[in-house]
Image (cartoon, rainbow, N blue to C red):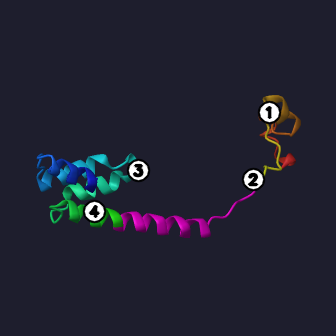
Amino acid sequence: MSNMIRELKSVGHNISDEQQVQVVIRSLPASWEYMKIHMIHKENIKSFEDIEHHLVLEDDRRDTSKTTDKAFLAESAKTSNPKKKIKNNKEWKKKGFDKSNQNDKSQF
């Protein structure tokens, strides 16, 4: 981005600091959405150098967090439920859960 700004200046297209900051913010990928919002509302970012500094710091932070996230990543094994699920009314009756037997307390 800084090269593009230099090239534009060399051919006579001067872009204001505010425009440079806006272009950089708009060019950030969707995964940086939180950073876009943060940069838009931060009042002390007035030049390309300011936003460049913050973005480099954020990129370093993201790289560092990726390596630590991988260090704590654990893989869990899937376990199946050993109890058979009763799917229809016939199986309920076989198991002794028929509604007609609810009043008979001797089963319990």
Look at the picture and state if 90 lies above or below 5.
above
Look at the picture and state if 21 lies above or below 99.
below
Mark 3 surroundings: few (<14), some (14-19) or many (≥20) residues within 10 A = few
Q: Are marks 1 and 2 in contact (CB under 8 Å)?
A: no
Quarter of image, res 58: bottom left
In this rendering, the label closer to the viewer, 4 or 2: 4
Mark 2 surroundings: few (<14), some (14-19) or many (≥20) residues within 10 A = few
Sequence order check, earlier mark of 3 and 2: 3
Q: Nearer the viewer, residue 63 or 98?
A: 63
Residue drawn at x 37%, y 53% is: 32
Sequence order check, earlier mark of 4 and 1: 4
Residues shaded magenta:
57-77
Q: Are marks 3 and 2 in contact (CB under 8 Å)?
A: no
Sequence order check, earlier mark of 4 and 2: 4
Label 2, secondary structure: give it: loop
Amino acid bearing label 2: Lys
Residue 85 belongs to the span the image colors magenta = no
Location of residue 19 in the rendering, given as x and y in whole percent from the top left corner:
15, 50
Which of the numbered marks, if any, corresponds to residue 89? none
Which of the numbered marks, if any, corresponds to residue 52? 4
Quarter of image, res 53: bottom left
Residue drawn at x 84%, y 33% is: 91
Sequence order check, earlier mark of 1 and 3: 3
Look at the picture and state if 95 lies above or below 32.
above
Q: Which residue is mark 2?
A: 78
In this rendering, the label closer to the viewer, 1 or 3: 3
Q: Which residue is mark 3?
A: 31
The residues bearing labels 1 and 3 have C-alpha atoms spaced at a distance of 59 Å
Sequence order check, earlier mark of 3 and 4: 3
Label 4, secondary structure: give it: helix
Q: Which residue is mark 1?
A: 100
